[in-house]
Image (spheres, rainbow, N blue to C red):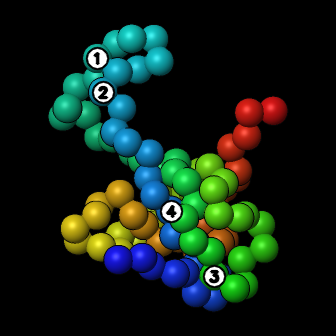
Amino acid sequence: MKIKAIMDRVIIRLDEVQEKSKGGIILNDDAENVRNIGIVESIGSDVKSVKVGDRVIFHTFDELPILNDDPNLVAVRERGLLGVITNE
């Protein structure tokens, strides 16, 4: 199944849960894992600031899970995006 975003919505595939920190420390499973970074999979016709494939960070209060069988897929309004992550 493929979902196409509409209007000002952005469909984002969340990054995987980190098991180790960048420094190599093993993270506790009980710790709250805030996942607010992901890859844009679909954009609505009103979205102007990002494109499919962009890696973005967004405000976690604005996310809306959209599929029960895929918890890594969320919808966010464009105004809930905080920025595009680049390697520059």
Could you tell me which residue is drawn at 35 percent across and 57 percent down? 72
Say whether residue 27 is left or right of residue 54: left
Q: Which of marks 3 and 1 is nearer the N terminus?
A: 1
The numbered mark, 3 or 2, whose residue comes first in the sequence reads: 2
Q: N-terminal of the two: label 2 or label 4?
A: 4
Q: Residue at x 18, y 34 (%)?
A: 30
At label 2, counting other C-alpha atoms closer than 10 Å, the crowd grade (few under 14, some 14-19, many 20 or more) is few
What amino acid is labelled 1 in the image? Ile
Q: Which residue lies furthest to the front in this view?
A: 1
Identify the residue position indicated by label 1 in the image. 26
Q: Mark 4 points at which residue?
A: 12
- On the image, the x and y values in percent for residue 77 come to 58, 75
Residue at image coords 52%, 48%: 37
Give the farthest residue toward the left: 30
What's the distance in space between the residues labelled 3 and 2, CA to CA?
Answer: 33 Å
Asked if labels 4 and 2 touch by Cβ distance under 8 angstroms, the answer is: no
Residue 44, numbered label: 3
